[in-house]
């Protein structure tokens, strides 16, 4: 088979393999300033109440975009905040809601064994409409006070999440 014929054949196959309407996917992501505002807002909201917390913000792929260990926060709060943020992102709902599902549903309990997932409240998804673009998680406050701090962080950028 000649080189010219192989090139022509390859071009023909490629033309049929890729639909003419194929395009790159486009989506919105958190900017540096938004990530910083969410993380700082969440920690500051808890610190204002006297809580020593850590915060993690993850992007749409679950990777850490920002992580802050606040003054006096225990070491384990870093990992817990990451897992809460990841859980909220993964299931596109508050990690507290996932915790409730784990308590009731054996299927949810099995999902709780996935790496990085945790059934504890404090994580919230970051959304634009129905598109989940990230997650934020707080760990370290007593008795379920983490989630309001996560919400305070998101509230700092709510006008930009459109």
Image: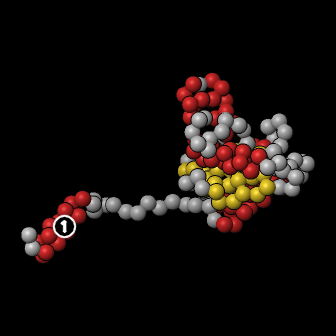
Residue 21 placement: quadrant: bottom left
Question: Do we see residue 10 in this rendering?
Answer: yes
Nearer to the camera, 12 or 2: 2
Secondary structure at numbered mark 1: helix
Going 63% across and 47% down the picture, which residue do you hit? 86
Nearer to the camera, 159 or 49: 49
Q: How is the image coloured?
A: secondary structure
Task: Report whether 13 appears left or right of 41.
Answer: left
Going 9% across and 73% down the picture, which residue do you hit? 2
Q: Quadrant of the C terminus?
A: bottom right
Residue count near mark 1 (Cα–Cα under 10 Å), binned few <14, some 14–19, many ≥20: few
Going 68% across and 44% down the picture, which residue do you hit? 84
Image coords of residue 134 (percent x, y): 61, 53
Residue 6 placement: quadrant: bottom left
Name the residue at the bottom extreme.
Answer: 4
Image coords of residue 139 (percent x, y): 77, 45
Q: Is residue 118 above or below residue 161?
A: above
Q: Quadrant of the N terminus?
A: bottom left
Question: Do we see residue 93 in this rendering?
Answer: no
Going 60% across and 35% down the picture, which residue do you hit? 112
Residue 61 placement: quadrant: bottom right
Nearer to the camera, 23 or 75: 75
Image coords of residue 109 (percent x, y): 60, 29
Q: Which residue is mark 1?
A: 10
Name the residue at the left extreme.
Answer: 1
Task: Report whether 61 appears left or right of 7.
Answer: right
Numbered circles on residues, count: 1
């Amino acid at each position: 088979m000649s080189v010219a014929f192989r090139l022509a054949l390859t071009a023909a196959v490629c033309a049929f393999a890729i639909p003419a309407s194929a395009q790159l996917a486009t989506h919105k992501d958190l900017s540096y300033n938004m990530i910083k505002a969410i993380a700082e807002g969440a920690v500051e909201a808890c610190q204002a109440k006297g809580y020593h917390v850590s915060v993690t913000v993850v992007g749409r792929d679950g990777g850490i975009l920002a992580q802050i260990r606040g003054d006096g926060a225990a070491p384990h709060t870093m990992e817990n905040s990451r897992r809460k943020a990841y859980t909220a992102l993964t299931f596109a709902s508050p990690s507290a809601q996932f915790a409730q599902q784990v308590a009731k549903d054996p299927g949810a309990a099995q999902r709780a064994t996935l790496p990085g997932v945790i059934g504890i409240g404090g994580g919230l998804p970051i959304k634009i409409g129905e598109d989940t673009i990230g997650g934020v998680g707080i760990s370290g406050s007593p008795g379920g006070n983490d989630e309001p701090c996560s919400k305070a962080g998101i509230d700092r950028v709510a006008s930009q999440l459109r």
